[in-house]
Amino acid sequence: MVKPGVTTQEIDRAVCRFIRSQGAEPSFLNYNGYPASVCISVNDEVIHGIPGKRVLREGDIVSVDVGAYIGGYHGDCAATYACGKISEEAQRLIDVTRQSFFEGIKYAREGGRLSDVSHAIEEYVEGNGFSVVREYVGHGIGRNMHESPEVPNFGIAGHGPKLLRGMTLAVEPMVNAGTAAIRQMPDGWTVKTRDGKYAAHYENTILITSDEPELLTVPAP
């Protein structure tokens, strides 16, 4: 549905219908007062964009963040998509953000440290000339939408909680094309880049195992 002429509200309603058609409920709807089922953040919006009458245009990049609750547990995932033809630099931002997640979870193994994941994400993002948002982080997830521990996308390797088999984590790099600085909008939810440059977001819920982590959610490519 991410194409020119579609409103963010239309995407939100379609996602809500699909989640409920599967016997689940949207995790985000009414969460701490959030008024929609999906967070849709466009261009310089980093996260928590509220769906509405905004019409998507050719060249936009659109981050779609979805949570679903079923069988007593939450799942959380996000990805950034091109709306029609976008610039090469915007596509590179999307690609680096997505790959930074996979660089990070190479270290998401039983016995490792949480900051090993965080450090790998930061190193990959900054090595490609982009910036990692500091104020917002990933999180534990399970019976509650947000649980301990926090999962930063930056840090020094070898620190933080030890990763244990059975942990479920939402790992979610939030990456800015310019500086890491952000600003909170008056609606109390939407977060934008301070310099007005584009931002991208990628997230999956993962399970720590004795071997490679299992991806419990996988956004469409």
Image (spheres, grey):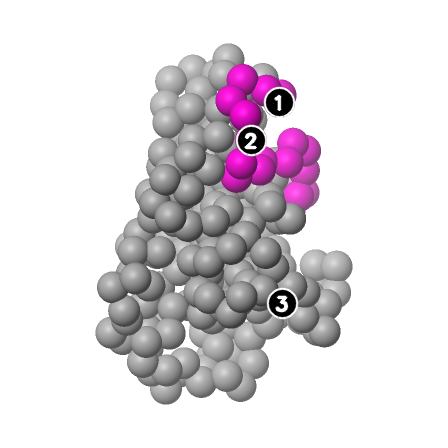
In the rendered image, residue 216, in percent from the top left (x then y), is placed at 43, 39
Query: Magenta stretch: residue 58 in it?
Result: no
Mark 3 is surrounded, within 10 Å at the Cα level, by few (under 14), some (14 to 19) or many (20 or more) other residues, namely some
**Mark 2 and mark 1 residues within 8 Å of each other at the beta carbon:** yes
Residue at image location 47% in from the left, 71% down from the top: 42
Q: Badge 1 is on which residue?
A: 160
Outermost residue toward the top in this view: 111
Q: Can residue 25 be seen in this view?
A: no
Query: Magenta stretch: residue 156 in it?
Result: yes
Mark 1 is surrounded, within 10 Å at the Cα level, by few (under 14), some (14 to 19) or many (20 or more) other residues, namely some
To which quarter of the image does residue 57 belong?
bottom left
Q: Which of marks 2 and 1 is nearer the N terminus?
A: 2
Q: Which of marks 2 and 3 is nearer the N terminus?
A: 2
Q: Which of 131 and 70 lies nearest the eye of the viewer?
A: 131
Q: Main SS type for the magenta part?
A: loop
**Mark 3 and mark 1 residues within 8 Å of each other at the beta carbon:** no
Badge count:
3
The label number, if any, that marks residue 155 in the structure image = 2
Q: Describe residue 135's horizontal placement relative to residue 214 as left or right.
A: right
User: Which amino acid, mark 2?
Assistant: Gly
Q: Which of 123 and 204 lies nearest the eye of the viewer?
A: 123
Residue at image location 54% in from the left, 17% down from the top: 158
Q: Badge 3 is on which residue?
A: 190
Which secondary structure lies at badge 3?
loop
In the rendered image, residue 130, in percent from the top left (x then y), is placed at 41, 50
Is the residue 148 above or below the residue 37 in the image?
Answer: above
In the rendered image, residue 12, in percent from the top left (x then y), is placed at 51, 72
Span colored in magenta = 144-161
Q: Is residue 175 visible?
A: yes
The label number, if any, that marks residue 177 in the structure image = none
